[in-house]
Each structure stands twice: as structure tokens, then as C-alpha cells.
Image (tube, grey):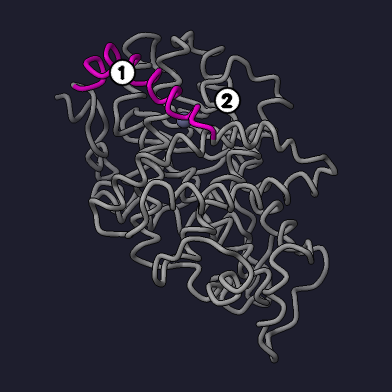
Amino acid sequence: MMMAGDDAALDETLASLGLTRFTPPAPKPGGLVHVFQIFEERALARLGGIADAYAAPGGIGFGFTEHRDLDAIAQRGSKDVICIYSATVRTMWSLANAVMGIREMFPWIDDIDRLGAPPPPPKGELFFVQQATFASEPIRRKLGAALFDAAMDFALMHEVAHLWNGHVDLLHQRHGPLPYREMHLVEASGLDLAEAQAMEFDADSFAVQKVLARVARENPFAEFSEGLLRDHKVPQDGELTASWYFTWFSIYVLFRAFDEACIVAAATPRPQPSAPLRLACLLPTVAGVAARQGWSKLDMGQWEIIASEAALEAEGAFCRLRRAAVDTDTFKSAWDGRAFDVIDYHLRTWERLGPALAPLRRGAMPAAAGSVTASARIA
Ligand SMILES: [Zn+2]
């Protein structure tokens, strides 16, 4: 295995933005491992699962940088690079735990809590968790960990899309070898806003398909199904109903946290619509792909009910944590058909963007086998 701190492509990418690597803190006695380390291991396993080049040692430059923006970057250099900003991991982990700390959220979960579960970790150890992959956590924390996992998987696959769908290469072609970043993208690169919006939609569509494919395979929220279905009237989809519901919940929280971070960082203009509309825009893709792949029997209307119910619950939790009122009018207006107008707008941009991206689309960069440098490969 490549040693941490031994990735020149990642360091070079960060240096181009004036950033440095953030290394996950070392484990503590008693099997306590930092949440960054757990996420890093999962991210590398998932990246290895979608491309042989990423499965090779050092096949992708993956890591973190310490920064207060809720951001992520994708870059192609001597190999593919994905860097997640520390605030993204911290915020999503804190939010998932805080949401589950609201006793009124999913109250059914406490009814089915099992006796004999191990006690929660000592106070002040929010970010250090048991290595046994959350499995030994009390059930509320376990659901929080699963929500975090689904949200971060989406964030990761969204960055993969920027690499594979030609977005990073197009940015290089037009504006030089900048990394593709989520916040300040248009400000920093001069990328056309409509094109950036269409690429963000493309990356979300790619990510949601990868995430749902995994959810259909692994059914990660199965154990929360009984309680959820007792309290929520949502369209049934066999054993996967709860996993669909909580996956939408997770993705919504990620979008919502990103909205908040963009406002705080005054990141404008931004190429993503606000959380409810961003989620609604994914539904036609999901309904189509899920039916085609045989993942689900839900139709478009049923997908919309599950996704909007989960998103509203997530919005309620988010507002409660921020002591803000839910803006129900803005939320509801996302589901009144305006997503189709947004998609239509992206498709019109795609008429000129699609042909530019087509020759740039490809999978992972081939693994450089560690010792082979870019110049050696050219020679
Ligand atoms: Zn993006």
C-alpha cells in the first residue's frame, strides 16, 4: 500500500490552490478510530470497486485538506485526484449525529432499540468511533452513521463524474490546468455559468445512479424498515423502501448543508440550484434508470412522494438544528413541475456542451504503477 503523505499528484493539486494536506488523526486506545479514517477507507474501497485503475495501489490521489469551506475538488494530472475538504466531512458527520440527537426525529427508533447495546462513547469523542464500522453503535448513532455514509458516497461519486464525464478536461481545455471545485467554480475559473450548471446536473445524475445501484445491492437501511413503515405512509417497494427513503434524506442534507455553506462563503454565482429543486431534478433520471435496471417497481409519481417526504423531514430537522422556520413555500415550489423547466434548460445548454464533452469522456486514468511518471509514459 501507498503510505499516507506519499501522493505527489494530490499534493500538487492542493499546492495549485495554496492548500495543504490534512491527515486523519491516529487511532486512540480502545479501538477508537477517527471518522476521517473510516471515510477514507470506505472511499478508497468504493473507488476501487468502480475502476481497476483506482483499485491499484496509489491508483488515485485521494485525501483531505483542512479548510472551512464545504467543498471538494477533482483534478486530472499524472493521475486522477479527488480531495474532500475537512469541513465537508466534519459538517456531515456532525449533522448526521445532531439530527439523530433530536428525540422527536424518528421516535419509533427508540421503541426498537435493543437491550444490551454497548454504552455510548465518552463525551467529547464525537469524531472518534468504534472501528467495528459503527456496527456496535446504539441504534440512533448507527442510523446517523448510515446517513453520513450515504451522503458522503454521493459526494464522492459526484467528483468521479467530473473526472469521467470530461468536465475537468473541458475546464483545462478552456481555462488552463485548474482543479474543478464545487464552490467558487465560476468565479475562479471563468467557466460559462449555464455550462457549469449543466455539468453539475450531469454530475448529480451520475452520482445518484451510482449511489442507488449500491443501495439496491446492499440495502443499507434494511433494519430501520419496520419502524419507518409503521410511522410513515410512503409508497412500498419491497425490502428497499426504507433504504430509498433514507438515501434521499441523506442526499438532501448534503445539498442543504452545501446551500448554507455557499451563503456563508458568499459563493456566487453558483451552478447548483437550491436543495429542494436540486433533488427534484434527479427524479426523472432515477425513475428511468431504476425501472430499466430492475432496481425498483416505483413509478415517477411514487419516487417523487418518497423523495419529497424524506426531503421535507430532512429540511425540518435541519431548520430545527439551526433554530430557523421551515420555508414551506420555497420547499413546495420545487415540486410543482419547475424541475422540468430546469432540466429543459440544461438540455438546451447540452446541445452545445455535449459535443464538446463527448471526445473528453473516459473512465479512470490508468494507474501509473507508482514509479512511472507522466514524462516517462510520454517517452
Ligand atoms: Zn460538482
Would residue 275 appear left or right of 44 to someone viewing this image?
right
Tell me residue 7's x, y (percent): 43, 41
Tell me residue 345's x, y (percent): 40, 17
Residue 91 shows which numbered tag?
none
Would residue 282 appear left or right of 53 to someone viewing this image?
right
Asked whether residue 351 is drawn in magenta, I would say yes
For label 1, the residue is 350
Residue nearest the observer in this picture, 46 or 20: 46
Asked whether residue 269 is drawn in magenta, I would say no
Would residue 332 appear left or right of 73 to someone viewing this image?
right
Q: Label 2 to label 1, Cα distance in Å? A: 22 Å
Mark 1 or mark 2, which is nearer the start of the sequence? 2
Does the residue tagged 2 have its C-beta within 8 Å of any atom of ligand 1?
Answer: no
| Residue located 78% across and 61% down the image | 102
Extreme-right residue of the structure: 323
Q: Amino acid at mark 2?
A: Met
Q: Secondary structure at mark 2?
A: loop
Q: Amino acid at mark 1?
A: Trp
Q: Secondary structure at mark 1?
A: helix
Q: Is residue 34 visible?
A: yes
Does the residue tagged 1 have its C-beta within 8 Å of any atom of ligand 1?
Answer: no
Q: Is residue 179 visible?
A: no
Tell me residue 85's x, y (percent): 59, 38
Residue nearest the observer in this picture, 159 or 33: 159
Residue 183 shows which numbered tag?
2
* Residue range corresponding to the magenta coloring: 336-358
Residue nearest the observer in this picture, 379 or 95: 95
